[in-house]
Amino acid sequence: MRIPSLLLSLTLLMRILPADGPGDWPRWRGPDNDGMARGDAPLHWSDTEHIKWKAEIPGRGHSSPVIWGDKVFVTTAVPTGVVPPAETEPAPVGRGGRGFGNKGPQPEQKLVLMALDRKTGKLLWQQVAKTATPHEGYHPTYGSFASNSPVTDGKYVVAFFGSRGVYCYDLNGKKVWEKDFGIQLKMFMTFGEGAWPVIEGSKLLLLFDNEVDSFLVALDLATGKELWRTPRPDGNTNWSGPVVITYEGKKQVIVSATKKVHSYDLETGKPIWEVGGLGQNTIPAPVAGDGMVFVMSGFRNPNLLAVKLGREGDLTGTDAIVWQNQRGNSYTASPVLHDGKLYVVTDSGMLSCFDAKTGKAFYQQQRLPKPYNFKASPVGVNGKLYLATEEGDVVIVKMGETYEVLATNTLEGQVFIGTPAIADNEIYLRGQNTLFCIK
């Protein structure tokens, strides 16, 4: 007699709780955290063909767009015109040289979350989360004060600006809560901040890895109340972020960082396992599948580790490390995992495809048709891998064991730093000041 009531309750619960579908891209690595989209995406476009709309995005931001329902969300930082004292050097604007970021007082910024109409690209609403004078700058070419991509669960959308706080809104732009941790992150080489926020169920996860006092924190998504905080003495500066995976029914938070990757219990924040062996300046996101998690560093002492799940404690040097790779790793871009294959692109434009179970390379360090530079991560859909370059090209490669270029599409004068989003057969590309919807 209780079964009909139970089924009714479950039906009502499913109607209440949002669930992402083929038309959603709720987080920067896609609906399944593996860089893969659902459905399909266009194969050919140009400045005059297949552009559904383009929208001007003011200011500077290298975050990626996220999508839910009829809205596209994007963050940016807009200078107010208030400049620091004359004796300090202002932050660089636009593309510049490579090297150290700018230190000292920065020009005042409006930190903005924007919602665009998905059908037309028109601005639906924007909220200035905070007007602030950042305490330090960013990498002159690849940094911004809005590099942390937003995240949504279909009820809330969260904009995270690191040292400048975290802000939670409903999908109509009404602020639900905000939280300022009262800290000023000190980033290595003053390259700027950029770790992404994560929504998992009722929790919001934020990572504050820097040169002093690193920690991982979980907040109640609905209220901003702190649920737990875990110190990270091995943290150091880190531009990667947390990724939640489920193994044998238990959820754990994976954080890939300089020298070590850590796993924490989602409910308590307590450490589960750790593995040493990564190099400096970790940026790529972890990705998991087939009972393993794949973590990568590509700068000094590069390494890619395939770690078998199900163990606890310090797993460094044990058979929990199924395979490793030191050639052709990505410094910046996150990998794509699909159909038992791991796709990795270097910052200098060399593509590799590995057997995820064994580490065998189907092809390795394959050069693309032209010399390219990469900061955007690849995304995949329907057997196609999309590679957005700094040179304004998007190279599309066939996914599988054999390397094959399917198309190269160019938007003149564009520079792609943020990762594309794919949803409902459309691709969303963020240039320096323009967001494109291609269909």
Image (cartoon, rainbow, N blue to C red):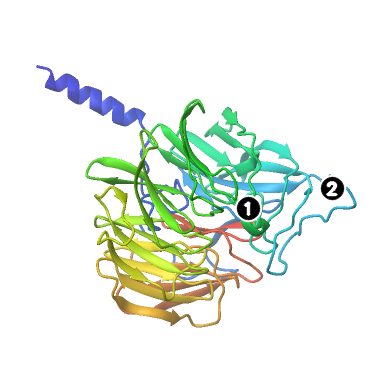
| For residue 114, above or below residue 281 | above
| Front residue (pair 410, 246) | 246
Residue 89, picture quadrant? bottom right
The label number, if any, that marks residue 187 in the structure image:
1
Mark 1 lies on a secondary structure that is loop
The percent coordinates of residue 50 (x first, y second) are 52, 64
Residue 400 location in percent, x, y? Answer: 30, 73
**Quadrant position of residue 334:** bottom left
Between 347 and 339, which is closer to the camera in this rendering? Answer: 347
Provide residue 350's location: percent of width, then percent of height. 47, 77
Q: What numbered label is drawn on residue 83?
A: 2
- Is residue 60 depicted above or below 328 in this figure? above
Q: Earlier in the sequence, mark 1 or mark 2?
A: 2
Left or right position of 172 against 304: right
Determine whether label 1 and label 2 are within 8 Å by CB.
Answer: no
Q: How many marks?
A: 2
Task: Give the CA separation, mark 1 to mark 2.
Answer: 22 Å
The residue positioned 43% from the left and 56% from the top of the image is 260
Residue that sits furthest to the left in the current view: 1
Residue visible at 71% across and 65% down? 95
* Element class at badge 2: loop
Residue at image location 60% in from the left, 34% down from the top:
181
Q: Position of residue 122 (x, y in %)?
A: 61, 46
Residue type highlighted by circle 1: Met
Eye-nearest disc, 1 or 2: 1
Left or right for 316, reference 1: right
Q: Residues within 10 Å of mark 2 (few under 14, many from 20)?
A: some
In the rendering, which numbered label is found on residue 361? none
Question: For this view, does 335 lie left or right of residue 349?
Answer: left
- Tag 2: amino acid: Val
Tell me if I can see residue 404 in this picture. no
Residue sitting nearer the eye, 202 or 292 = 292
